[in-house]
Image: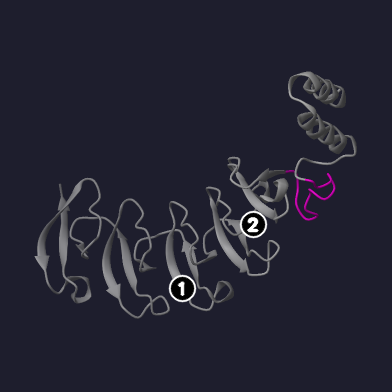
Amino acid sequence: MILHQLWKRATALVVGRGAGAVAAAVALVAAVAVGGTVSGMSVAEAKPAWGFAGRWACSGQPVDAGNVITDHDSAGCGGYGSWYQQPAKDGIWTCSGSPVVAGYVITDHLTSGCRGMGAWRHSLAHDGIWTCSGSPVVPGYVISNHLRAGCGGIGSWQHTHPHDGIWTCSGSPVVAGYVITGHMTTACDGAGAWRHNTARVGLWTCPGSPVPSGFRSTSYAAWACDGLGGWVLARA
């Protein structure tokens, strides 16, 4: 049915658009007839051996929601390049520049992956998982440790569910309902660390700490927050 429709379009071009357009249409019919694709690859070649159902898209086309990019063909789409996208799954390797689907983090890096462009492994976030520098932090998590030599030498950070009194690395998000109450310059493999506590009346908070709804900052003391200065929490 598809071949019949394409052939009807090709013959219609004889009258309407001239021989050049007809030649292009006939080439498209021939490609479909032998199992090819518009990008010039056969159906078999267009499926990465280690992946599952997805599709090739030309450079510049949007990536479907929930999908990641897992392969690249520089000769695809008439030389403009094409990218293979498929649904995200735990542990999947993706090309540099691939979107990171919500709920996932980046956990490893391979410089030679994705045909030399570099590849990154995507994993579902869970308590204690180590992530590469530059990975998004999933909402509800904090960064609790740092390893400079991790993730192939680019550095890695540990994702953890927060709890009262947890020490987090500099740059970690502060989960709603928590405040920052202490500081250590040498922790987190030298990156520095901040203590997070659930907000309550009487806590001394550090400069830059959020003030949760229902609370307000009052008196100041220079000795608070390990000498950085701080303000005590009171009910709003």
Membership of 53 in magenta stretch: yes
Query: Alpha-carbon distance for marks 1 and 2?
Result: 23 Å
Sort mark 1 into few (<14), some (14-19) or many (20+) by Cα contacts within 10 Å: many
Residue 54 position in % (x across, y down):
72, 43
Residue identified by numbered label 2: 94
Residue 68 position in % (x across, y down):
62, 49
Camera-side residue: 69 or 6?
6
Tell me what residue is drawn at x 50 percent, y 73 percent: 155
Q: Amino acid at mark 1?
A: His
Tell me what residue is drawn at x 11 percent, y 69 percent: 221
Quarter of the figure that contains the N terminus: top right
Q: Are marks 1 and 2 in contact (CB under 8 Å)?
A: no
Nearest to the eye among marks 1 and 2: give it. Answer: 2
First reached walking from the N terminus: tag 1 or tag 2? 2
Residue 80 position in % (x across, y down):
66, 50
Q: How many dots with numbers?
A: 2
Could you say which disc has been placed on residue 132 in the image?
Answer: none
Q: Is residue 198 above or below residue 144?
A: above
Region of the chain picked out in magenta, as a range: 40-54
Camera-side residue: 72 or 122?
72
Q: Is residue 74 above or below residue 148?
A: above
Q: Secondary structure at mark 1?
A: strand
Horizontally, residue 119 falls left or right of residue 193, namely right
Residue 171 position in % (x across, y down):
36, 65
Q: Secondary structure at mark 2?
A: strand
Horizontally, residue 229 falls left or right of residue 39, namely left
Residue identified by numbered label 1: 146
**Residue 103 appears anywhere in the view:** yes
